[in-house]
Image (tube, rainbow, N blue to C red):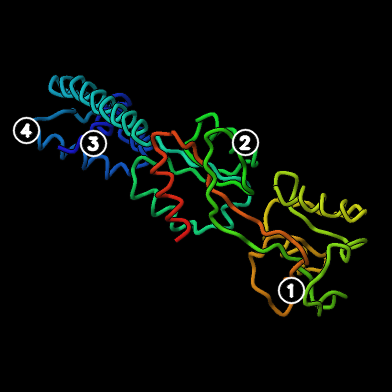
Amino acid sequence: MNTRNFKCFQTVYEEKNLQNAANKLFLSPQGLSKIIKSLEDECGTTLFLRTKDGFVPTESGKIFYERSKFISKSINEMFSAIETVSERERRFQVGFAAGTLRAVDIRSIDTFMKSNPEFVSSWNEYDNETILNRVINDNINCGLVVGKHTAPGLISELIKSVEIVLYVYNGHRLWDMDTVSINEIKNEPLISMNENYHIYHDVLNACRTSDFSPEIIAKVGDGETIHSLVKNKIGIGISPKFFPDSDDIRAIPIEDAYTWDVYGVYLENSPDAQLAQRLFQEIRS
């Protein structure tokens, strides 16, 4: 007996009308009628009398309703208990600082998570400090952050280094340059990642070290938007090098620029430190 059909029976019992019950179940009346007939055949008795006033339950139908409600309740409780245990088993959480998902192979991370049932699959991004604090306070098991950070008991492993470049559009005065200095973006309309990203603050500091404030005309939340705005000649953009050159836009290395480094962080004494190490090894490979 298909216990999923209990709900169909219970709805007909409560509505006493096949059409109303079918509407509630998003079924056709003909399909619902077949389900009820199938249940009656399995039980070897009539569960409803079909009258001009609707579906009237027989004594057998009343018994079936009460027992099916009990069975449905037990099944729901069973699945709820299984779900609760499953949630406890999926205890290992990974945090991602803004931008880090762009730098790593998401498919390899996803495959690793799915092959290890301890992982909670979550792809939310937060700012660097939030991820660091959550790892240090043991709220999550490990994280991907930008830049190397130190704290008592914190392990930082370099995952990937990405070159910082200046994206320029075809026809811009810097188009044919092999490299550019930070001074050459002075007075240029600049497109940058927003304040949630480590690179935004690094760009500001680099410009101020060269005694000027950049003319930032757009602060965005992802590399694709920088690429699109530059391609449409809204301005030039500073970003980690995530996109290949084309006829419309190219990436020019910035002299003396640092690399955009993604680190994996976890607590040395965490009972799940080895699992974090395995994850980071998978990401690096």
Q: Nearer the viewer, mark 3 or mark 4?
A: 3
From the viewer's side, name the closer residue of 270 and 46. 270
Cα distance, mark 3 to mark 1? 59 Å
Q: Image point 21% across, 42% down: which residue? A: 34
Q: What separation in Å lies between label 3 and label 4 (alpha carbons)?
A: 16 Å
Mark 4 vs mark 1, foreground winner is 1
Q: Nearer the viewer, residue 245 or 152?
A: 152
Q: Hey, what amino acid is under mark 1?
A: Ile
Give the distance between the C-alpha atoms of the residues marked 4 and 2, in whole angstroms: 63 Å
**Label for residue 130?**
2
Residue at numbered disc 3: 5
User: Mark 1 vs mark 2: which is more N-terminal?
Assistant: 2
Q: Are marks 3 and 4 in contact (CB under 8 Å)?
A: no
Please state which of residues 156 and 188 is positioned toward the viewer in this rendering. 156
At numbered mark 1, what does the secondary structure look like: helix, strand or loop?
strand
Q: Secondary structure at mark 4?
A: loop
